[in-house]
Image: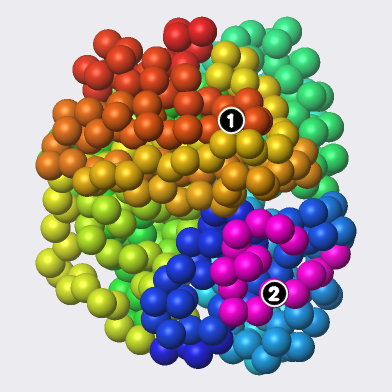
């Protein structure tokens, strides 16, 4: 096993990676910005190195500073968590060139899946279903208009280099397309340094279902079930559950087989997620994107399959076999994750601030992956995620019952937070039925 690890992230995911590292006897070194010096992940690491000021570009995304920290700390490997440098192929290559192990997929896989159009084309070639859309960037507005006319309205206008729900627009007609194309292109150039735009069919009623894959050290790719991610605001996830209440055994078999083909098509190693859109009316699903990293929502898979995905990531990076039998993966029970954010529970606008009260719920089937404690401050420099409240039960009904109790027990004061929204959701008839889609939050508001 790896003996020392640099965790290039912050908050709950850094703390979560450090927890597994310590359990395995791996020396965990954290990097942090000046703004995060007082957070739990910094004090819980065996060693911590400040890599710059609050601005992520000068700290968590500062490749030179991060590699210098790895060298000074004498680590063997780097785990990027999610976000920041996790899907940066150049960084992954620089880590390898420095003689360190990269806990993630290879640079080639990151590059192949990082461009939405290239990824769609690769998946189509591999036999993975893809939604109708462009096979190359819409070079200008005229090309976008022609593509939309061929695909049929409504269409989704997407940044080819985007991710995390950013860089998207919906057009129901040509007038809207002209507005959205310019808007998405400008946003993509500003945020991703790449203004390439793709046009694909938009499904007004759709579910967002993804499959957790793991590329093993021996070259095999295995799938650890699916996750339902349809409770979203602004195309960003708020709640995830596994298994999906919309997926039948027959559909699950097709989902998992397609996800494995997707991983095999790029020689995938380590943890990744194949995200798809599911048409609840027809049972058809289409490839959306592949996230070449550990997902925020990985805990629901861990609880249903009884694995520690961070440990499996470290084992793959070290060339070791998994702790489980790949031919005997069996899901048990049901798990739900609620993303506790520092945001207004009505409009979901960020609401950072000092935490005056923080008491986490406990009990059977309750897990909290948190990045903060009372006395910390949620700053405006980073994502608003404060904690993930994850519950599990023998079935969906028990998981929902435990989630209700856990939300009521979670005492949080200071920053605005979305716990009231979760209390509302867990009593919402549409959510309780399991027959919901990505429009559920807008219908609640």
Residue at the (14%, 58%) spot, across then down: 330
Label number found at residue 302:
none
Label number found at residue 48:
2
The kind of secondary structure element at disc 2 is strand
Residue 246 highlighted magenta (yes or no): no
Q: Nearer the viewer, residue 165 or 66?
A: 66
- Label 2 and label 1: CA atoms lie apart by 28 Å
Residue at the (80%, 82%) spot, across then down: 68
Q: Earlier in the sequence, mark 2 or mark 1?
A: 2
* Image quarter of residue 241: top left
Query: Residue 414, how many percent across, how many down?
Result: 65, 31
| Residue 89 seen | no
Residue at the (56%, 19%) spot, across then down: 345
Which stretch appears magenta?
A: 37-52
Residue at the (77%, 15%) spot, across then down: 179
Residue 50 highlighted magenta (yes or no): yes
Horizontal side, residue 178 vs residue 225: left or right: right
Residue matched to label 1: 413
């Amino acid at each position: 096993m790896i003996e020392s690890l640099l965790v290039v992230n912050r908050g709950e995911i850094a703390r979560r990676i450090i927890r597994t590292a310590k359990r395995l006897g791996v020396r965990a070194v954290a990097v942090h910005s000046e703004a995060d010096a007082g957070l739990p992940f910094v004090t819980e690491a065996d060693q911590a190195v400040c890599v710059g000021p609050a601005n992520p570009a000068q700290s968590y995304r500062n490749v030179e500073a991060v590699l210098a920290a790895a060298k000074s700390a004498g680590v063997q490997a780097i785990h990027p968590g999610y976000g920041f440098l996790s899907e940066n192929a150049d960084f992954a290559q620089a880590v390898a060139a420095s003689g360190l192990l990269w806990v993630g997929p290879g640079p080639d896989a990151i590059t192949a899946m990082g461009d939405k159009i290239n990824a769609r084309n690769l998946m189509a070639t591999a036999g993975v279903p893809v939604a109708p859309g462009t096979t190359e960037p819409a070079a200008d507005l005229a090309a976008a208009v022609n593509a939309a006319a061929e695909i049929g309205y409504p269409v989704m206008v997407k940044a080819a280099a985007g991710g995390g729900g950013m860089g998207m627009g919906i057009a129901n007609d040509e007038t809207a397309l002209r507005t959205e194309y310019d808007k998405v292109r400008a946003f993509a150039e500003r945020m991703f340094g790449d203004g390439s735009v793709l046009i694909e069919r938009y499904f007004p009623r759709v579910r967002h279902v993804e499959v957790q894959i793991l590329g093993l050290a021996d070259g095999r790719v295995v799938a650890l079930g699916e996750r339902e991610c349809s409770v979203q605001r602004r195309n960003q996830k708020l709640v995830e559950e596994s298994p999906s209440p919309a997926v039948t055994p027959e559909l699950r078999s097709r989902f998992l087989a397609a996800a494995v083909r997707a991983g095999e098509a790029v020689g995938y190693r380590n943890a990744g997620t194949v995200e798809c859109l599911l048409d609840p009316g027809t049972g058809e699903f289409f490839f959306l994107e592949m996230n070449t990293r550990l997902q925020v929502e990985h805990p629901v898979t861990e609880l249903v399959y009884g694995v520690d995905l961070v440990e499996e990531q470290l084992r793959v990076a070290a060339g070791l076999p998994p702790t489980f039998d790949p031919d005997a993966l069996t899901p048990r029970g049901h798990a739900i994750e609620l993303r506790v954010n520092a945001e207004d529970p009505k409009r979901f606008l960020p609401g950072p601030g000092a935490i005056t009260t923080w008491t986490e719920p406990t009990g059977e089937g309750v897990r909290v992956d948190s990045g903060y404690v009372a006395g910390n401050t949620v700053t405006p420099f980073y994502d608003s995620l404060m904690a993930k409240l994850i519950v599990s039960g023998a079935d969906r009904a028990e998981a929902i019952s435990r989630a209700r109790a856990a939300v009521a027990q979670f005492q949080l004061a200071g920053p605005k937070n979305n716990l009231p929204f979760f209390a509302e959701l867990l009593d919402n008839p549409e959510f309780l039925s399991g027959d919901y889609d990505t429009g559920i939050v807008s219908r609640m508001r």
